[in-house]
Image: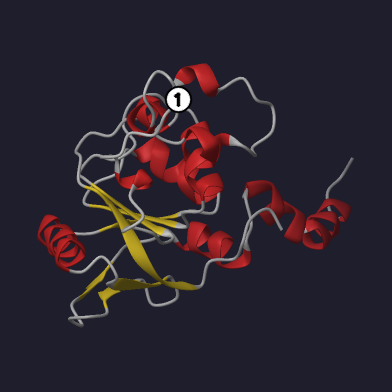
Amino acid sequence: MAYDKFISLKSTMVPLPIENVDTDQIIPARFLKATKREGFGDNLFRDWRYNPDNTPKEDFVLNNSVYSGKILVGGRNFGSGSSREHAACAIYDYGFRCVVSSFFADIFKNNAINMGILPVQVSPGFLDEIFSIIEKDPSSELEVSLTDQTITILSTGSRENFEMNSYKKNNLMNGFDDIDYLQSMKSEILEFAKTRAI
């Protein structure tokens, strides 16, 4: 299994109400030299989290102990810019399992799913409602059900459905990336191969 299975998640949220967050802001290019997928979380939002002398910026949300959880709530057009999969690696490695936004860049969205992160696209109004709830009470929780494809603000009961490709949904619920999916069908593939002429 490549990643943790995602069935449902109930968690507090970390708000990042910034639009057009691009992949270079998520993980700056100078940190892309690693050959393994681990360790990128240390540099998630590096230039927003730290000063040039490597001291934490107190006003950045990841440095604020008031906010925690496995759900990152971002502004519209999250994950724009280059196609680097390291951006999704950094988010997963930091500990987030779900990113909520009113719009995702397509390549980032696919990379996130392949890394075991559920990108949940909601309406602009619902996103504003989430940010408002977090501002009023940082201990508020969202419940995200991949099975039902719903996202719910638990304190109010407000809920929306979200779309998800059935193949990607199956992979997330089984903890598969694309290679794992093929491996899961190995016996069927071998049986099919036997019927083909060489």
Q: Please name whichever residue, 143 or 2, is drawn nearer the observer in this view of the structure.
A: 143
134 left or right of 12?
Answer: left
Look at the image and tell me whether residue 85 can be seen: no
Residue 106 screen position, x and y as percent? 35, 39
Label 1 neighbourhood size at 10 Å, few (<14), some (14-19), many (20+)? few
Picture residue at 83% right of the left edge, 49% below the top = 196
Residue at the image position 36 percent from the left and 55 percent from the top: 65
Image quarter of residue 24: top left
Q: Nearer the viewer, residue 51 or 111?
A: 51
**47 to 39, vertically: above or below:** above
Return the x and y of residue 166 as percentages of the image width and height.
46, 63
Colour scheme in use: secondary structure
- Identify the residue shown where x is 54% and y is 61%: 172
Residue indicated by mark 1: 54
Name the residue type under label 1: Asn
Is the N terminus in the top left, top right, bottom left or bottom right quadrant? bottom right
In the rendered view, tell whether residue 9 sits above or below residue 89.
below
Placement of 163 over or under 197, stated as above or below: below
Q: Is residue 54 above or below residue 68?
A: above
Q: Quadrant location of residue 18? A: top left
Q: How far across and down, in percent of the image, does residue 52 sit?
A: 39, 18
- Say which element carries label 1: loop
Q: Is residue 97 visible?
A: yes
Q: In the rendered picture of this protein, how many numbered marks are placed on residues?
A: 1
Q: Position of residue 198 (x, y in %)?
A: 89, 40
